[in-house]
Image (tube, rainbow, N blue to C red):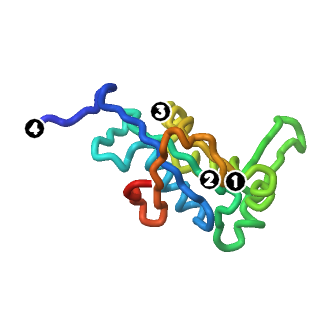
């Protein structure tokens, strides 16, 4: 029996939508990273780009556990100059840019290579519940059970 290797003609990129309201940030990021990489498909190969598109709505309502809202430093930006380090906690980043908060968490769950940077471009994040991708007819993705809902 030969090992199946996906070819470019075998690739299909489906669209999924995730509602982040009340979902714990780490669990959301882990589930979304698996879908972006294509690990939920039976034809998964680590060297092939089998991932799907993921739309995350209500990013501003994502939940964090414990005291991470005020204690965890999630965003660091260093200019290279003395006293040029700027850090944001989860709460500060949620107030300024909730999309960056979720994108940073998902990026941390992805492998650090060229393929994952391409796959991360398929992630669309919106702070509110409005999104412009209704024409793609995204399938609802239940992050708590990590199963794709039937229908819409």
User: Is the C terminus in the top left, top right, bottom left or bottom right quadrant?
Assistant: bottom left
What residue is shown at x 66% (from left), y 49% (from top)? 130
Q: Nearer the viewer, mark 1 or mark 3?
A: 1
* Labels 1 and 3 touching (C-beta < 8 A): no
Closer to the N terminus: mark 1 or mark 4?
4
Q: CA distance from mark 3 to mark 2?
A: 25 Å
Q: Is residue 21 left or right of residue 82?
A: left
Closer to the N terminus: mark 3 or mark 4?
4
Q: CA distance from mark 3 to mark 4?
A: 28 Å
SS under mark 3: helix
Closer to the N terminus: mark 2 or mark 4?
4
Considering depth in this image, is 53 or 78 the residue closer to the camera? 53
Q: Which mark is residue 119?
A: none
Residue located farthest toward the right when viewing the structure as drawn: 83
Q: Nearer the viewer, mark 2 or mark 4?
A: 2
Q: Which mark is residue 115?
A: 3
How would you rate the neighbour count of disc 2 (Cα within 10 Å): few for under 14, some for 14-19, many for 20 or more? many
Q: Which mark is residue 128?
A: 1
How would you rate the neighbour count of disc 4 (Cα within 10 Å): few for under 14, some for 14-19, many for 20 or more? few
Q: CA distance from mark 2 to mark 4?
A: 43 Å
In the image, residue 20 above or below residue 133? below
What residue is shown at x 54% (from left), y 34% (from top)? 117
Q: Nearer the viewer, mark 1 or mark 4?
A: 1
Q: Pointer 4: what residue?
A: 1
Q: Nearer the viewer, mark 3 or mark 2?
A: 2
Find residue 4 and report its image quarter: top left
Q: Position of residue 121 (x, y in %)?
A: 56, 35
Q: Which mark is residue 57?
A: 2
* Labels 2 and 4 touching (C-beta < 8 A): no
SS under mark 1: loop
Find residue 50 and report its image quarter: top left
């Amino acid at each position: 029996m030969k090992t199946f290797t996906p070819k470019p003609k075998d690739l299909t990129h489906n669209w999924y939508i995730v509602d982040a309201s009340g979902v714990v940030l780490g669990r959301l990021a882990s589930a979304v990273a698996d879908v972006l990489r294509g690990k939920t498909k039976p034809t998964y190969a680590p060297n092939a780009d089998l991932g799907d598109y993921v739309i995350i709505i209500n990013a501003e309502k994502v939940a964090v556990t414990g005291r991470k809202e005020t204690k965890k430093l999630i965003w660091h930006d260093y200019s290279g100059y003395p006293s040029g380090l700027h850090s944001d906690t989860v709460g500060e980043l949620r107030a300024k840019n909730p999309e960056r908060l979720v994108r940073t968490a998902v990026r941390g769950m992805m492998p650090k290579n060229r393929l994952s940077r391409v796959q991360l471009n398929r992630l669309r994040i919106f702070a509110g519940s409005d999104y412009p991708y209704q024409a793609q007819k995204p399938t609802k993705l239940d992050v708590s059970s990590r199963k794709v809902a039937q229908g819409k």
